[in-house]
Image (cartoon, grey):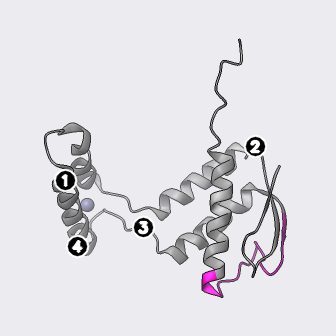
Amino acid sequence: MKLVTSPVTKFPGTVGIKDPIPLNACVEWEAGLAECQPTPCSEGRAILTQFWKAPDKSKDEISAEYEAHFTTCVESGGKCKLGLTDTAAQARMIKPARACVEEWKIEGFDLANPPGSPKAARSRFIGWLITEISNVYNEAEAAGDPNE
Ligand SMILES: [Zn+2]
C-alpha cells in the first residue's frame, strides 16, 4: 500500500492506494479513462492513421482534416464519440478509483457518495487522486535484468 497525503485543504487526510493495484482494478481504470477520451469512428481513425501512414502529409493538415470530420460526424449523429466533460469524467473515475484504494481517511469526502461542491476543491482533489493512482499504476520498470 502506498500512503499519500491530500494537498487540498477542503479535503484533508490520507489515502492508502493498493500497491500493487489488482489486475481487475486496472481493467476498470483503463475502461474509465477510455470513456473520458473522445473516440473516433472507423473513418475518423483512418484519417488519424495518416500520422504514421502518410509521413509526407503535414501534421496540421491531418489534424484539421480530423477535426472537420469529428465535428460533422458528431453533429450528424455519426459514430465518433465526444469525451466526457471534466465534471462527468471525474464522476466516471470515482468507481475505478475505489477499486484501487485500500484505506480512505479523507475528511469531508465520502468515496461512496462523493461531494460535487465546492467545484474547485472537488476538481483539484479528484485530479490529485487520479494522478496518485496513475503514478502507482504507471511506475517505471526498474532498470536492469533481474536474472543478472
Ligand atoms: Zn466519425
In this rendering, would 65 be left or right of 77?
left
Q: Which residue is mark 3?
A: 83
Q: Is residue 114 magenta?
A: yes
Which marked residue is nearer to the observer: mark 4 or mark 1?
1
Q: Give the percent coordinates (x, y) of residue 128.
A: 65, 66
Question: Disc 4 or 3, which lies upstream in sequence?
Answer: 4
Amino acid beneath label 3: Gly
Confirm if mark 2 falls within 8 A of ligand 1: no
The reply to whether the C-beta atoms of the residues labelled 1 and 3 are less than 8 Å apart is no
Residue extending farthest bottom: 118
Q: Which residue is mark 1?
A: 62
CA gap, disc 4 to disc 2? 44 Å
In this rendering, would 36 be left or right of 118?
left
Under tag 2, what secondary structure? loop
Chain part drawn in magenta = 104-120
Q: Which residue is mark 4?
A: 76
Which marked residue is nearer to the observer: mark 2 or mark 3?
2
Confirm if mark 1 falls within 8 A of ligand 1: no
Instruction: Return the residue nearer the eye: 76 or 148.
Output: 148
Question: Disc 4 or 1, which lies upstream in sequence?
Answer: 1
